[in-house]
């Protein structure tokens, strides 16, 4: 369904009482929201997360609000179901919002919203997105910004504070950047590709790939207990990014890459400079994610990225890296020293 169609359907709800005949709310926000990205008492429920569309119910108690944030390359629609609150975009006046209001935030616009001093705010948000995270969090809305003059509150939102003093930014996963790979598998015997960046090494013989449960690809991984991880370089990046923006449940991604079939029957991207063929040995599940722990049965590398000793030369391969906080891609940098060598300068002093 197109965004405008979804908005129209959801807008009909605004003409109705948001409680049923037992006095219970429709779309109740049941779970305590993380204090990592919210100030005050905020409850939340994810009503839909298809991997490309997210609908979330929020309940902001008086004086609570979310952080300054933005949605990379996609707009968000906010529908106020009940109560009153505030909404502000960077460089614009803070505005009061109330039941029946519909606010469409353009892509990449920094903004925040929350309840007023006296009222609870109940709202729905609709966001079409890619990757695992649909919002980039910036910083908390200060008390001065929240309570300041509604017309004149236009303070610039800065990402970086130039200071050498360390600041507690909450329980943030900050081990970025991470390598970008294209995961190749089959879903119902059809080749499917998905970009993945939450990958890691477990010991010297296993890797882990973490994927949101709603991804279509997870079904294939669980069916086959195997897949390939194809390292992405700059040449491969546009196509890799594309397979992360559409779901295999609705789009046939088979022909995005030319591929060769590995011994385990899984597809390997021909243009990838390095491919690991993986077998799933365990699945660690949480409420929202599947974490696939795998052994590597074989690794294929183009000769052009191997050194004279037959080892992968990453200064030649230059794998693409992903940085979650800003939703950007980076490339591998220069060599700055040799492991277990540069530290000897300290030992010898």
Image (cartoon, rainbow, N blue to C red):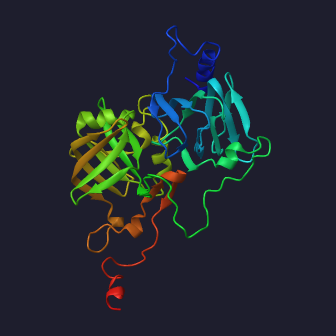
Q: Residue furthest right?
A: 151
- Judging depth in this view, the residue of 283 and 40 nearest the camera is 40
- Judging depth in this view, the residue of 284 and 225 nearest the camera is 284
Residue 82 position within the rendered picture, expressed as x and y whole percent measured from the top left: 62, 22
Q: Is residue 27 left or right of residue 114?
A: left
Considering the image in quadrants, where does the C terminus appear? Answer: bottom left
Residue 279, compared with residue 44, is above or below; it is below
Q: Residue furthest bottom?
A: 349
- Judging depth in this view, the residue of 154 and 236 nearest the camera is 154
One can see residue 251 in this view: no
Residue 220, compared with residue 313, is above or below; it is above
Considering the image in quadrants, where does the N terminus appear? Answer: top right
Residue drawn at x 39%, y 37% is: 254
Residue 270 position within the rendered picture, expressed as x and y whole percent measured from the top left: 36, 51
Residue 208, compared with residue 214, is above or below; it is below
Residue 51 position within the rendered picture, expressed as x and y whole percent measured from the top left: 45, 34
The quarter holding residue 347 reads: bottom left
Q: Is residue 98 left or right of residue 192?
A: right
Residue drawn at x 29%, y 74% is: 308
Q: Is residue 14 left or right of residue 326?
A: right
One can see residue 188 in this view: yes
The quarter holding residue 88 reads: top right
Q: Residue furthest top?
A: 21
């Amino acid at each position: 369904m197109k965004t405008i169609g979804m908005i129209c359907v959801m807008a009909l709800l605004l003409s109705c009482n948001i409680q049923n005949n037992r006095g219970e709310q429709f779309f109740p926000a049941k779970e305590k929201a993380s204090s990592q990205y919210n100030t005050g008492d905020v409850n939340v429920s994810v009503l839909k997360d298809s991997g490309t569309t997210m609908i979330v119910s929020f309940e902001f108690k008086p004086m609570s609000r979310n952080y300054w944030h933005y949605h990379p390359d996609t707009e968000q629609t906010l529908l106020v179901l009940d109560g009153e609150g505030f909404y502000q975009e960077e460089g614009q006046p803070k505005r009061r919002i109330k039941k029946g209001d519909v606010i469409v935030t353009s892509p990449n616009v920094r903004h925040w919203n929350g309840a007023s001093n006296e009222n609870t705010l109940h709202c729905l948000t609709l966001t079409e997105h890619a990757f695992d995270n649909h919002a980039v969090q910036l910083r908390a809305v200060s008390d001065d910004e929240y309570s300041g003059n509604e017309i004149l509150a236009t303070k610039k939102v800065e990402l970086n504070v130039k200071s050498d003093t360390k600041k507690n930014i909450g329980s943030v996963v900050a081990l970025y950047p991470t390598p970008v790979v294209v995961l190749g598998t089959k879903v119902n015997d059809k080749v499917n590709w998905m970009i993945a960046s939450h990958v890691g090494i477990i010991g010297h013989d296993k890797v882990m790939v973490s994927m949101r449960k709603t991804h279509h690809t997870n079904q294939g991984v669980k069916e086959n207990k195997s897949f390939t991880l194809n390292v992405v370089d700059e040449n491969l990046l546009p196509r890799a990014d594309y397979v992360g923006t559409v779901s295999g449940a609705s789009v046939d991604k088979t022909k995005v890459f030319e591929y060769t079939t590995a011994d385990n029957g899984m597809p390997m991207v021909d243009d990838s400079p390095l491919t690991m063929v993986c077998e799933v040995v365990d699945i660690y599940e949480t409420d929202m994610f599947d974490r696939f722990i795998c052994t590597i049965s074989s690794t294929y590398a183009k000769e052009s990225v191997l050194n004279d000793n037959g080892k992968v030369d990453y200064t030649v391969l230059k794998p693409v890296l992903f940085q979650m906080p800003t939703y950007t891609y980076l490339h591998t940098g220069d060599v700055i020293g040799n492991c277990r060598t540069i530290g000897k300068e300290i030992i010898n002093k």
